[in-house]
């Protein structure tokens, strides 16, 4: 953690905070930090001013009016936070006037990325609420825009309190060290390194995989109900393959798609509450709202996944770079540790063949797809957990 030595009092405070956090940060204060802070760079200060000038050019003044949601309170908070981010770099420069240090870089770059995402989010909301057919507008968005629109509200809830408090006088001495030591707790993904993003996604996937087995048992227990049904054979074949350690192919999965449709045994409205909550868990969508009405959340989630899959199909899986490919596979339940590019592409191709072939009333199948395609994968976390427990 870098502090600028302005006077003796500030230096004593900096030294005290350093020794309190030295075991976590492993910084050599007198050998590395103090000489670094004593060097002044006019060129660096000039670059900061040029950066801010570019920011003002990127975000014209006439864009301060944002789309107003039907929920006036929500959009009042959003608009105030949006306006606050415009001047956040000035707040940072006030406390780090002569040196771009680690803290400045993290908060400055992160706030700019968050600001840009908020602009995109606002534009999408405007398009949706001004359209007579918002579902059609959403389906025409790019994959990246869809993912941003669905994930940004959660990021704002996490990061807004930290950034607001950090603008208060003398609060930086507490907020910045805490945020740097626990970035994944107090900051959104805009402020994380790529390694931190992958570590968080990996830990979340571990928790999702722990729900695979109980979810599969919920499906298995319904098999007797298909006796005498035309699809008893295909359903039994799919479940039998998964139970014996292999996966069904996409044709076998699509053959049982109708049991996930209207009046089907596995349609979202016909699932038990415990089954619905397990599906939300394996798709990383658990929240207090989901616990209150899990079936409604399942319907919205399945439609969102379907729209993103169709956008991915339009843009082409082969056009994904390695970073996006790993993230997309992780979102669909695949543990990417030690998995090559070809295997990840093959997994996504199988997923998208099924996803893009489903009718609108059969989308509950998408929520079971991590089981159907990944239950027996050699990289599954839940089997490793059972092995070592």
Image (spheres, grey):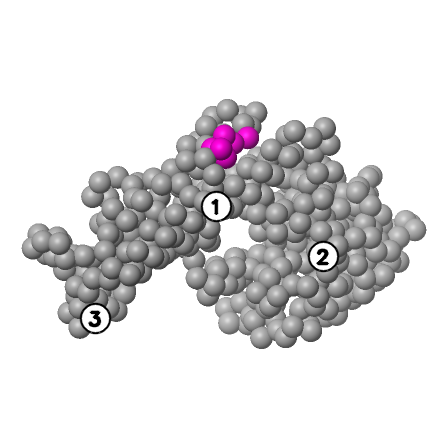
The answer to whether any part of residue 182 appears in the image is: no
Of tags 2 and 1, the one toward the viewer is 1
Looking at the rendered structure, the secondary structure element under dot 3 is helix
In the image, is 362 to the left or to the right of 130?
A: right
Point out residue 200 in the picture as x, y percentages from the top left corner.
48, 59
Question: To which residue does mark 2 refer?
Answer: 315
Q: Residue at x 20, y 43 (%)?
A: 170
Q: Residues within 10 Å of mark 3 (few under 14, many from 20)?
A: few
Against 270, residue 283 (above or below) is below
Name the spot of residue 358 as percent of width and height, x first. 81, 49
Residue stretch rendered in magenta on the structure: 62-67
On the image, numbered disc 1 is attached to which residue? 58
Which numbered disc, 1 or 3, marks the residue that appears first in the sequence?
A: 3
Q: Nearer the viewer, residue 186 or 311?
A: 311
Determine if the magenta segment contains residue 64: yes
> Which residue is painted at 81% across and 65% down in the image?
249
Marking on residue 214:
none
- Mark 3 lies on residue: 32
How far is the residue under mark 2 from the one under mark 3? Answer: 48 Å
Q: Is residue 289 magenta?
A: no
């Amino acid at each position: 953690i870098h502090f600028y030595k302005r006077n003796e009092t500030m230096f004593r405070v900096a030294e005290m905070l350093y020794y309190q956090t030295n075991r976590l940060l492993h910084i050599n204060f007198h050998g590395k930090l103090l000489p670094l802070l004593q060097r002044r760079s006019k060129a660096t200060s000039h670059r900061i001013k040029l950066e801010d000038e570019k920011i003002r050019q990127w975000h014209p003044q006439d864009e301060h009016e944002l789309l107003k949601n039907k929920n006036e309170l929500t959009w009042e908070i959003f608009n105030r936070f949006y306006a606050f981010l415009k001047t956040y770099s000035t707040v940072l420069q006030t406390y780090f006037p002569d040196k771009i240090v680690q803290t400045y870089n993290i908060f400055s770059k992160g706030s700019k990325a968050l600001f840009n995402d908020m602009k995109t989010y606002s534009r999408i909301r405007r398009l949706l609420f001004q359209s007579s057919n918002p579902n059609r507008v959403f389906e025409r968005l790019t994959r990246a825009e869809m993912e941003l629109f669905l994930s940004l509200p959660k990021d704002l809830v996490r990061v807004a309190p930290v950034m607001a408090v950090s603008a208060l006088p003398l609060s930086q001495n507490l907020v910045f060290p805490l945020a740097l030591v626990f970035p994944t707790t107090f900051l959104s993904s805009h402020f994380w390194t790529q390694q931190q993003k992958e570590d968080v996604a990996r830990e979340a996937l571990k928790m999702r995989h722990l729900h695979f087995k109980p979810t599969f048992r919920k499906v298995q227990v319904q098999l007797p109900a298909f006796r005498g049904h035309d699809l008893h054979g295909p359903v039994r074949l799919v479940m039998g393959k998964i139970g014996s350690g292999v996966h069904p192919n996409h044709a076998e999965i699509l053959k049982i798609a109708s049991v996930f449709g209207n009046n089907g045994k596995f349609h979202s409205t016909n699932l038990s509450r415990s089954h619905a909550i397990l599906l939300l868990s394996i798709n990383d969508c658990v929240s207090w709202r989901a616990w209150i009405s899990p079936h409604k959340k399942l319907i919205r989630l399945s439609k969102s996944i379907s729209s993103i899959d169709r956008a991915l199909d339009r843009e082409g899986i082969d056009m994904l770079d390695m970073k996006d490919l790993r993230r997309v596979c992780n979102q669909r339940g695949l543990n990417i540790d030690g998995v090559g590019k070809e295997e990840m592409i093959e997994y996504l191709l199988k997923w998208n063949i099924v996803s893009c072939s489903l009718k609108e009333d059969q989308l509950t199948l998408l929520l079971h797809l991590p089981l159907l395609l990944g239950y027996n994968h050699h990289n599954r976390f839940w089997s490793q957990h059972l092995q070592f427990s």
